[in-house]
Every structure is written in structure tokens, then in C-alpha cells.
Image (tube, rainbow, N blue to C red):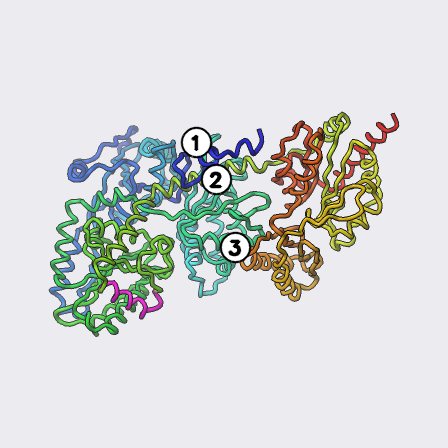
Amino acid sequence: MTLNDLLTAENVAQFLPLSGHLPNIPGRIINVTHQIPYSIMRSPPTMTPIDDYDNTQDQQQQANQQQQPPTPPYSPAASSLDSTTDEEHESVDLFRKMHQQKKAAATYPSGAPISKLARHHRRQGTLRVKFHAADWTVVQGRGHGALYAGLQSLAQHWETIHIGWTGPIRVAHSKKIVSAESIEPKDKQKLEGLLRETGKIVPIFLDNKAHGHYEGYCKEVLWPLFHYLVWTNATDGRNEKQYWKDYVAVNQQFADTVVAQYKKGDIICIQDYHLLLVPEMVRAHIPDAAIGIFIHATFPSSEIFRCLAARKEILRGMAGADLVGFQTYSYARHFISSCTRVLGYESTLVGVNANSHQVSVGTFPIGIDVDRVNRFRKQPGVQPKMDAIRSMYAGKKIIIGRDKLDQTKGVLQKLRSFEQFLHDYPEWRNQVVLIQVTTPTVHGANKLESKVSELVSQINGIYGSLEFTPVHHYHQDIDRDEYYALLSAADVGLITSVRDGMNTTSFEFIICQHEQERYSPLILSEFTGTAGSLSAAMMVNPWDFAGVAKAINEALSMTPEEKLTRHMQLYEHVTAHTASFWAHSFVKQLVSCTEQRSLQSHATPALDSDLLLDIYNKAEKRLMFFDYDGTLTPIVSVPSDARPSKEMLQYLQTLCDDPRNEVWVISGRDQQTLDNWLGSTVTNIGLSAEHGCFLKPAKATQWTNVLDDVNMSWKHDVTEIFEYYTERTQGSFIEFKKSSITWHYRMADAQYGAFQAKECQNHLENAIVSKLPIEVLIGKKNIEVRPASVNKGEIVKRILAQHANADFVICAGDDKTDEDMFRTLSTARLAHAQALYSITIGPPEKKTMANWHVKTSGDLVNVLGRMAEIGCSSNLS
């Protein structure tokens, strides 16, 4: 069966990520996240060990479940901002605090003091577990609601398992952390069994390296860099080195767990920047595994990413995947550019070529679980709180902001913009209130909190009065009901992140507004991941305070008709592109990439020369195609030194003398060089110059130009770019051919030449390739630009058509330009397919469309010599 037989319309449709078909996955989906969707707590050790566990829920939990609809055991947290804990704390309703602030305005013109009381909201699905040395509580974790909802949806169609860290295991009613080493082995086994039964979860118990991995490398190195927060304090690097060691160790532990759980036919989906090394680590043990990794955070430009000390290791780790997914197109382009500039990988139409391993790069914007949001929004506690908020600010316009308190969320920019709005549009003073909720972060942001509080006091002091406070700031977690009440009561939603991977709050705002039929407008920062999807929102630059102020004024003055038009566009997108849609799209694209990989390339075995010679000897009509540089001769520093050896010329002449043989040398060299080195020495040999642009069949005296109808106007632009880098790279030079232009840097400094080549490649692909019908080929110490419609494969196809009765075909080459020949031969319908020998020159692990390999050009020449001996023997007989 050939590639044409497999690539039918029906077969291809099954792997299109947006089609209605579900791919056939022979195994399971292994979802890998940094943490599992559960939190584990342990009570103080008991004196009496209990060997069996009981997963019955307490009376209070049952009472809560009677009031709320049941949630599946594997359900994600109540919402991405649900701040529930299992410890007993006093609960303070946000709307009651609002009322207290309003009453206290006379005493506190800048707003009442912010409460530090923690929230309490009991979650569903709590499991009380007792075994061996302690009592354990397993409760749904909080955060990452969209991620877990998407992964859960996959279980509707395929068998799934979930691998992740348990998270920090705490002692109940305290902040003490239970180390993984202190947990009894029997307790670990019982916890593993419970989690596997609960949600097919495979927990990973991390040792003390967990802190250096997450709190250290992830949060102090990767997260700031990915969000364009380049370090301002120079250090001696000792902490970073230790963090990196812990990051590698934890990634290796995850990879080992994946390998241990893997079964043939499984596909592996890895999530986010905590596990960037896992794809390559898994690939080392399971070369043929289907591996995808999705990055939920932003991905910076190559200029920023190059600041990372372990940049090469990170990119190689990610390139171990078959598919790398991002939230937006710009993040995907940044990754491809980083691979090009840092590692020298060649970019392709679908991603990058990582040393002959095709890595597809795609964009998959994540959504939310719309049904789940609607269910929570309709809880009995939401409407009373929403009514209370509206009654407190009757006759006022309410602007809602809810963000984590970190530098990327743009809280300071939001407050500055609101201050500018009150200054520029005095008619709205005493008519508009901004309710800003800032959720405390794990690391804390004391300096930022102080700046926010000072700015709130400043705004309220200037534009407030004893009767009215324009800004109400609540630095605390709020429960789910309060959150949805705020989103539902808002007249404007205001999100001013300066850098944000996605921001699902904007999606939830749209759903809440739709159900209330308010259709309030959404003001959204252009630097959020959702900006590319929610085009009907009012886009703003959060650093442009006057621009944001103008957008606030327009939002408050917008007509009902325009509100409805904008809202319906937003609502249609949110309801169509859900978390389930995201997860299914990513899995389907991963399956498609894996199928294409199995069709397009494979690792090659060493050439069985004895078998080849036996088939060659029996054949009646033989076709031979050979590349020149790197195939018939080794690669040399100076191209003009790659003259053919006497032995090789003798072997070629003997092969050409056999009437059963049709011998072609298909090279990137120009016509004159091939004529001088081969045409004038070897008779009856066919020649093709400049990658198939010119032909000279055996016994012909003139070259045939196949470029007569090809547009070559691109040469001027490419020449200017090559000249720019030649002037700046000592030892480099340009080779001009009739059909292509090549920039050589073999004689340049190895490291600097490679660096300049990456820069040049990036320049070409961004400035030229996207506009003109050309392609960039990365060779050995050179970059070549040629027309996209002309290649060696086209010449092989033409010659094959003229010799359809050939019963032996041999084709040899060493680089990407020769892959065009191999690809053509792999799809050709030969009468004797078993007599096809496509041979690549390179190491055994090299992936190619060829079906055999030899290690060096000398090995191939030796095979030609043995073939020539057979020809001589036949002629003598």
C-alpha cells in the first residue's frame, strides 16, 4: 500500500482537528499535569492503626450535597477562583463588607480597612479516609478549572488516566507540610489505590526537590521570563543552578512515571511549563510514542527567551513532542523563532524540523465549561448577593475587576486608568464605582499590595466624598457565589492584564451577562490570550491610561443595540469554543501528527549490500539516482575542493557502460561544474544541475532549462539579505546559481557562523518566504534559497515516467534536498517495489524517507564498486 492509497479524503478527514470525526485511539490518553485535581491533608497520627479505609462522607458533607447538585468525583474545583479550604474559619460575605464600607465612608474616606479573614466554603466530594498510621482527607483542589474540565471531557470517548503530583500534603488545621519521605509505604499504597478508584489518578509523591522545582525554577525563573519580567537583580547563580537541578529531577520523575504507566497505543498529553523536559525524556525510552505538550502560559519572543541559561535544554525538551500547543498564534511563532535562533532548527509550514524529527506547532485557545458555569451561577446564594450589590449602588454604574495580585495582571494600570477616567470625564464622578477584588498569591506581593492600597486611597481622597467612595478594593479570596454575583451585576467588565496566558474570567463574565440579559460590554487588554478570540470586546492597551479611560466612557455610553451586537458575537464564541472543544481539538491534532509521522518517515536500517547486489544482478532494467556532495564525495570546507576521486569516476563509467543501466547524478552544483567534473570524464551519464532546474540526459550536448516559466524576481531581495550577513560574518561567501542562491559559512568561526546562520534564516523566513513562492533549505554549513516548485523530486518523477519498466531503482543522498527524491520514490507505483533502494548517508538514528542508510559517502562508493564488479563479470561472460 502506497502513501496515495492511505491519503484518501475519508482517511484525512478523520484527523482534521475541527472535523466532526473522533480519531481511533487504540490505547488510553495519559494526561500529565503538575498537580492532580485533589488536595490531601493528614490529621495528627493516631495511636491505633486501621488497615482498611472508609470513604464515607461526614454528616455535614451530606447536608451540603442535599443543597447543591452532585458533582462527579473527578470534577475540577468549584471555579478557577474558588478559595475553599477544609479548615474551620469565620466566613464574611463580601456584600456585607460592602455595606460596612459604605457606612464607614465617613470615618474612612479612602474606604474601610480590608479584612484579612480567610474564606470558608465547603467543597463537594470530600473523602474521609482512615488507614494505618493516620486519618486522611482527600478534597477537590482549587484552580485550573478550565484545564481539568477539558481533560475530564476526554473520558466521555476514550479511556484516560491522570498523572500528577499530590501537591503539598498538609497537616489538618495547621500550615505544617507532611514530607513524602515521612508517609508510611502502606499509606502511600492506600492513597494511590483510593485516587485510582476515584478518578483513575496516578499520584506522584515528590521529595524535597518539589520546592526547588515549583517555588524555585517555575515561579522564580520560568514564570517571570515567560511573562516578560526579566530579572533586575544580578546574583551569583547558585540558587538558580540548584533550582535547575531540582527542575530536571522532578521532570525525570514525571517521565519515569509516564514510562511505567505507558502501554502500546497510548497517547501522552503533557500540560504546561512545569514539565517542559518530559517530552524528550519520555521519547528517549519510547521513541514511537505519541507525545503532545500544551503551554497554558504565555511564551516570550526569542529575544527574551534567549536570556534563559537553560534555553537549549528547555527547547530540546519541548521538541521531543510530536505536537506543541499554545494559546495564541503569536506564542506559537515565538516558539518557532526560538527554535530557529537558539537551536538552528529549520522551520516548516507546520512547525519545526528538529534533526529530522517533525515537531508540529499549533494554536488551541482554551475555553471554559459553560454548563458548569451556568450551574454555579444559578446556585441559590448568587441572586440575593447580586440584588444586595445592586441595591447598595442603586443609580450607580458598576465596573468590576477581579485579578490575582501580581505584576502581570495590571491592577495598578487599571487604577491609574480609572483615575484618568474620573479626571477626563468629570460628568461621571459620583456616578461610577469600581469594585476591584485582588486575590492574594501564594508568594505574596507585599510591595505591590502597598502600592495598590496607596493608589486606592489617593483616588478616593481626590474624587471621593463623605457620601461616596469611587473605588472599593477587596484584597481577599471570595467564594464562588460572590464572584458570580459580581460578574452578573456589573455594568462594565474591566481586564487590563499587561501579560496573560489566557484569562478565563472574561469568558465567565460573558456567560453571566447573557443569563441576566444585561449584555454589559467587556473591556479587554490586548495582551491577554483571549484577545485574539474575543474580537468583539473593546480592546485596550493597559499602558495607555487615556485610551482605557476613553474605552470606559464609551462602554458606559454604549447604546443597547451595540451592546447586544457585541455580546452575541462574544457569546457565540464562548459557547462554541469550550474547554471540551479545546481538549478534543488538541488530541485529534496529536493523533493526526502521529499518523503523518508514521507515513512520512521512519528510522532506517543499515544497508544490506549483499541483498542489494543479488537483486541488482538479476534485474533487467536499472535506474540509478545519486546526489553529489556528501554522497559520492565527502563534505569539504571549500566547495571547489570536492573533486571526484579516480575510483568513483571509474565505478560510474563501468555502471554507465552497462546497457541495462540508466545513471543520473542529481546535484545542487551548477552546470559548468558538473560538466567539468563528470560530463567530460564519464560518458553516457545523465546530469541534473541546481536541484533539478537544469537537465542534460545521457549523450545530450545541451542543457535543458526547466525554469523558463518560473518567476525569479525574488533573487534581488534574497541577495541583499545574504550580502548583509556576508559583510558581518568573516569567512562566509555567496554562491550564485541560475536557479538558486546559497550562503556558505564553512570557513567562518564555527559558533559565530552558526549564530549568524540562525539569524539569517529567521530573517529570510519572516521577510521573504511568507511573501514569495520560494523555500529556504538548511544544508551543511550553508543556507540555500530556491523556487518552491522546483526540486530533485520533480526530476526523479519525470525520469521515472520515461522508464516505467524499471525493475531495480537505487537512489542515494545525504541532506534535505534529497528527501524530495526519497519522497517521490516512496509514493511511486513501481512494478517491483521490493527492488527499490533509497539510501541516506548518515547515522542510524537519522529519520528520513529513505528505507536504508550507510554511515559515510565512502561506504556508498564501496557499494558502487561492488556493483561495477558485477557489471564487469557479466560483460566478460
- Mark seen at residue 338: 3
Relative vertical location of residue 617 with respect to residue 106 in this rendering, above or below: above
Res. 178 visible in picture = no
- Mark 3, Cα crowd under 10 Å, few <14 / some 14-19 / many 20+, is many
- On whether residue 65 falls in the magenta region, the answer is no
Crowding at dot 1, Cα within 10 Å, few <14 / some 14-19 / many 20+, comes out as few
Name the residue located 13 percent from the left edge and 71 percent from the top edge. Answer: 466
Helix, strand, or loop for circle 3?
helix
Q: CA distance from mark 2 to mark 1?
A: 16 Å
- Between 839 and 92, the one nearer to me in the picture: 839
Is residue 86 rendered to the left or right of residue 534? Answer: left
Pick the quarter of the image with the N terminus: top right
Label 2: state its secondary structure. Answer: strand
Location of residue 194 in the rendering, given as x and y in whole percent from the top left corner: 32, 32
> What residue type is disc 2 on?
Ile
Residue 866, horizontal then vertical, whole percent: 80, 33
Of helix, strand and loop, which one carries label 1? Answer: loop
Q: Nearer the viewer, residue 430 or 231?
A: 430
Q: Position of residue 480 (x, y in %)?
A: 22, 49
Q: Earlier in the sequence, mark 2 or mark 1?
A: 1
**Bounds of the magenta segment:** 542-556
- For badge 3, the amino acid type reads Ser
Query: Label 2 to label 3, Cα distance in Å?
Result: 20 Å
| Residue type indicated by callout 1 | Asn
Check disc 1 and report the residue beneath it.
24
* Tag 2 near tag 3, CB within 8 Å: no
Mark 1 or 3, nearer chain start: 1
Q: Which residue is mark 2?
A: 291
Which residue occupies the foreground of this view, 348 or 241? 348
